[in-house]
Amino acid sequence: MRPLRLASLLLGLGLLTTPPPTAAQARSGAIKGIIVAVTNGDRRPLAGARISLIGTSHTSTTDARGTFHFADLDAGKYVIQAAAIGYSTMSSPLLLKEQETLDIEFEAQAEAVNLPELTVEERANHGPVDWIRRKSEGRGRYITRQQIEERHTSTVTDALRMVAGLRIECRGTMVCLVRMARAPRGCPPAYFMDGIPADQAIVWLTPIGEVEGIEVYSGPSETPPELESAQARCGVIALWTRPPPPRRPKEKKPKVVADTLNIKVRSPASDTISGHRFTIQQPSDWRRAR
């Protein structure tokens, strides 16, 4: 019983206290929030939006209530970015203090997207004008439809393995992690689909048969202005899909009209002529014998 009495005495004197929090616990903070879609004054939670802290490996997707949460963050400066298909991309700088929880609310505005015009007159130059122009400039690395067919690639991942300087990690899922050789860890490239910012999952899940070409830029010095974004400092992967085949005009069939002819048939048994009336179907351009 002496150890118990001694502990009670030390506790009463304030000499026995709980251990102080560790340095990691003292520094850890959190960022949470919600994304609300605003349309004609109506507000509703936006599910499926992609949230990322630029320059880090922290990414999240909003749930059915439009909420997200990042925990165990070090104190410091962050840039948070929110992106969703059909809405304008939003970003904001943040200053997170030790043991602080920041509560963020984004209001997403619907964005009208102008799709680039497709050039399909000449089979030698597939793809939109921007793709053809940038490929001719040669600032990045390009994968054409011809290369895809010659290498018999089966997925977008296989096609990107043709590009030197790309580090691709696939861990049993269809969505892989890509990093440029010169980019820091936890800094993925920006993704575009037909000139529009896209989630990387959409790019990876695109069937290779629908891909017309792929552009790869390793950093800001190579990235063209129209593909620049906050995430583009870690590289850009832009995918172009194939235009649908032109529709063939249907062949016109001759119109069928009903015509009535009076035909006289000679009966071989009685050697008499009897009148019969027949209704036949014939094309309108047939000429009836008089």
Image (tube, rainbow, N blue to C red):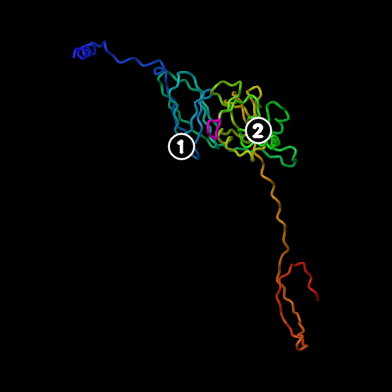
- Residue with the mark numbered 2: 214
Instruction: Specify the quadrant that holds the N terminus.
Output: top left
Q: Residues within 10 Å of mark 1 (few under 14, many from 20)?
A: some
Q: Quadrant of the C terminus?
A: bottom right
How many numbered markers are drawn?
2
Across and down, in percent, residue 143 comes to 68, 32
Q: Residue furthest left?
A: 1
Question: Which residue does the image show at 59% across and 21% down from the upper left?
Answer: 183
Q: Residues within 10 Å of mark 2 (few under 14, many from 20)?
A: many
Residue highlighted by disc 1: 45
Q: Position of residue 61 (x, y in %)?
A: 48, 33
Part of the protein shown in magenta = 170-177
**In the visual, does 144 lie left or right of 97?**
right
Q: Nearer the viewer, mark 2 or mark 1?
A: 2
Magenta stretch containing residue 172, yes or no?
yes
Residue 273 shown left or right of residue 19 in the figure = right
Circle 1 — which element? strand
